[in-house]
Every structure is written in structure tokens, then in C-alpha cells.
Image: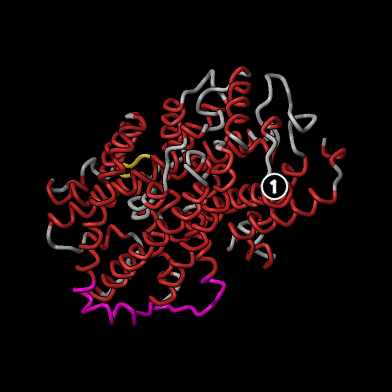
Amino acid sequence: MDQAKLEQNYDKYKTYGYGEELLPKKPDQRDWGMSNYITLWMGAVHNIMSYMTVAGFFVLGLNTTQVLFAVMLSAIIVSAFYALNGYSASKYGLPFAMLLRDSFGVKGAIIPALIRGLVAGLVFFGTTTVVGAESLNVIFARFIPNYMDLGGGFTLFGLAFPTMISYAILWTATVLLFLGGMKTLGKFGNWSSPVVYVFIIGAAVWAIKIAGGFGPILEYVPANPSSSPLVFIACVSALVSNWAGPVVNMSDFTHRAKSPKAAMIGLPVGFILSYILFAITCVALIAGTEIAFGEPIFNIVHAIDKIENTFAVVVLILALNVGAIAFVVFANLLPAGLQMSSLFPKKFTVKTAGVLTAIVGTLILPWKLVESTTTLFYFYSFIGSIFGPIAGIMLSSFFIHRKRVLNLDNIYVPAGSNGEYKNGYNPVAMAVLAVSFILPMSGAFLKGIPFLVRMNDFAFFSGLIVSFVLYTIFSKTLKSSQLN
């Protein structure tokens, strides 16, 4: 689309009542270069939830070599999806909420937008914050005698009183950072990544030292090893699901790209390079502490608590929480705010919607989801089952059905218009979304059907592949008259 036509369409769509954040970005508004995408997730990859996920790989029986391979394969897959699902926005400058209209229809886009913005956002906010709160317990216990005994054993819905205090502190810090706006978030991102890297590398060195070198870590095999390729694939799927949210709404980042090339190269390079260090520190901390102390550790915070030097413990936990906060704000609160404010502009701003996400994310009792490997992987199967289908439909729609050409007049429509589809819903997309979610998710409940159980084990991949194939078939076979 040439600049003159873009300027003309921009002014036309503005008269329809679309806010600045929803309009396609003009060339002078595209200010993200390759370096922005290379550094986008550098600090955020080092969050406690990701470390717990990889610790779960050892619990499930993978050895160090298999874990390293699983982590790096996950990084390649995620970065590839980032580039693919972010391409259309980098080409046309469309934010996620508007891009969804092309695949699902003007009204149908509300459903996947709500799923990404609120449902998944609040779940990830809650789980990440409660894990971070447990890490703060370790710090407070080092300085406050009997901190973990505060409240005399009082719990609320299964959450201990000391953890309530830590949760409230971390919840407040995260929300205040989010409310600080994009300038504050930008400054936070600029200094947080170097801080995280310095202390993460230090922790890896410590773990390698107590394990007797990197050789024993590479040779480490868990007590109950597994050579099943199905377990390996399930682990890869779980870690991919950890980043499935940004995969779906990557357009919220790439619509500001100076050029498609900036995002297409910057995203994979930055994510894969970041994951190389993440993989090394993961296996060093998890396998190293297990070797040194003779016990399997699922929660990475318990591994850190083994460090005798209190100063090292404090700075490392704070560094990991910096990464966790960056992950929560950039990948969850901000997308939630953007989607809810775009869907209900009269009821929500980006900030009020983000705060609502943080509140509801607490009310769902997220600590129940991360209390064991079983519940954590069940959580990932749900996330994968719902995000995989959305991504699959978007990819098929843009690359196969639309042949990489969008008609923005079907996306930006006057008030009261349903756009391309008669009722505002793309019936193929809505039906495929439902089927592609139900199939893999049903495996979590129908344990007597092996095929569905396997689909649930590989939920993200299952949902994405099924939705991509079904949408490609039906969008080609059904005539446009049947869809409109």
C-alpha cells in the first residue's frame, strides 16, 4: 500500500470513530527497528514460571541433554511463530484487535480478543505473581525471624498468610509499573535486561561450581528417566504454550515495525539468543542443585534458597522478579488493556482494563494452578488448546486464504456495518475455533480415549494444526456466497 493511499484511508477510517491506537500505523508512526525486536524479550525470558516449567521436564524424566534440546527447540518454534504471525501487522500496521476482524469478522473478532486479552491475561498474571510472591518469602525469611510463621498458620483459600503479604507487595509493584505508562515501561525494559543477565549468569556459575563443573550437569539423569518421545514433545508443547499469548497477539508489537524485515529478523534472533543463556542457566540451576543437595527441586526458588550468601539470594530473586514483572506487564496486562479498551471503549481504558485483569487474576486462586507439575502442565494444556487454534486460523487466513493481501475496507467499517460477513461473524472461523479447542482439551477429561489424551499432551500443536488444516480446507471449498 503506497503512502498516499495509506494517508487517505487513515483519514477515512478516522471519520468512522476509530481511536488512534486502533488505526493502521502510518510510516512516520512506525518507530520500532530491528534492535527493538532483538531486545524485546531478553529480560522477560528469565521469569520464574519458565524456570519452573523446565524444572518440570526433569521431574517428568528428561535428562540434561534432552532438556537442553527441548528448550532450544521451543525457542525456534516460538520465534518462528512470532515472525509468521507478526508479518501481516508489520506489512499493514494493524494492531491485533483489528487484525482479528479479517479472520473472524467484525463481531466475531470479539471472542478471540476476549480470550487473549482477559482470560489468558488474567491467568498468566495470577500464576506468575503468586510464584514471584513465594520467592519474596525467601527474602523476607532471611531478614525477619519466623516470617513464615506469621498468622499462626492462617490460610485463605489455600494461600498462607505470609504469602498473602508477599503477593500483595508484588501485585502492587506490578500494577503501579503498568499504570506508569509506556514511557515508564520503556525505561524499565532498558535497565531491567542487563540487571537480570548479570545475576542470572552469576547464579549459573554458582550452580556449576557446587555441582563440580558443567560435566556432571551434562551427564545428569533424573531418578526416573524417560526415553519416550511423547514425553519430550509434551514438554516442548508446554514451554511453547508459556509463550503462546505473545504468539497470538504479536501484531500488537509488530504493527509499529519500520519494515517487515526489522521484525522478521529481529524477533527470531533476539529470542533464540536469549534462550541460549536461558537454557544454560536452567539446567545449571536445576540439575546443579539436585546434584549438590541430592534432592529433586521443582520450584526454582527452593534451589536459590540453597545459596548460603544472603546478598546473592536477594539480588538473584529480585532479578528473576524483574524478568517476571516484565513478562506480566508486556505480555499480559498490556495486551489485556489493549483488547478490552478496543472492544469496550466507553467502559474501559487500557489502564482500567489492565487493573481489572490484575484483580480477577487474583480471584481465580492462581496458586492452585502452580502447586505441582501436574497442575502446571494441565494449565498449559488449557492455554495451548485455546491459543493454538486462534494462531492457526490467523495464519491460514492470511497466508493461504488471503494470499497475504488484506482489504482494510472490510476491517475498518462504519458504525453499524458488519463488514465482509453478513452477520459480522465468519462462520468457518467460529466453527473451526470451537472444534479445534474442544478436541485437544477433551483429552484432559476423556482419559479412556488415547488419541484425545495425546492431543491434550501436545495441546498447542494439536490446536494449531487442526485449526490450520480445517480452516484451509473449508475456506477453499465453501464459496463466498455461503460465507456471507
Magenta stretch containing residue 22, yes or no? no
* Residue at 69% across, 47% down: 397
Q: Position of residue 224 (x, y in %)?
A: 43, 78
Q: Is residue 1 left or right of residue 299?
A: right
Residue 386, relative to residue 28: is it above or below? below
Instruction: Using the rendered view, name the quadrant where residue 230 is placed.
Output: bottom right
- Tell me the crowding category of disc 1: few under 14, some 14 to 19, or many 20 or more residues within 10 angstroms, Cα based: many
Residue 300, relative to residue 482: is it above or below? below
Quadrant showing the C terminus: top right
Q: Which residue is mark 1?
A: 397
Magenta stretch containing residue 216, yes or no? yes
Amino acid type for the residue under numbered disc 1: Ser
Residue 285, relative to residue 63: is it above or below? above
Q: Position of residue 302 (x, y in %)?
A: 27, 60
Residue 229, relative to residue 397: is it above or below? below
Q: Please provide the residue range marked out in magenta.
A: 208-232
Q: How many marks?
A: 1
* Residue at 67% across, 62% down: 452
Label 1: state its secondary structure: helix
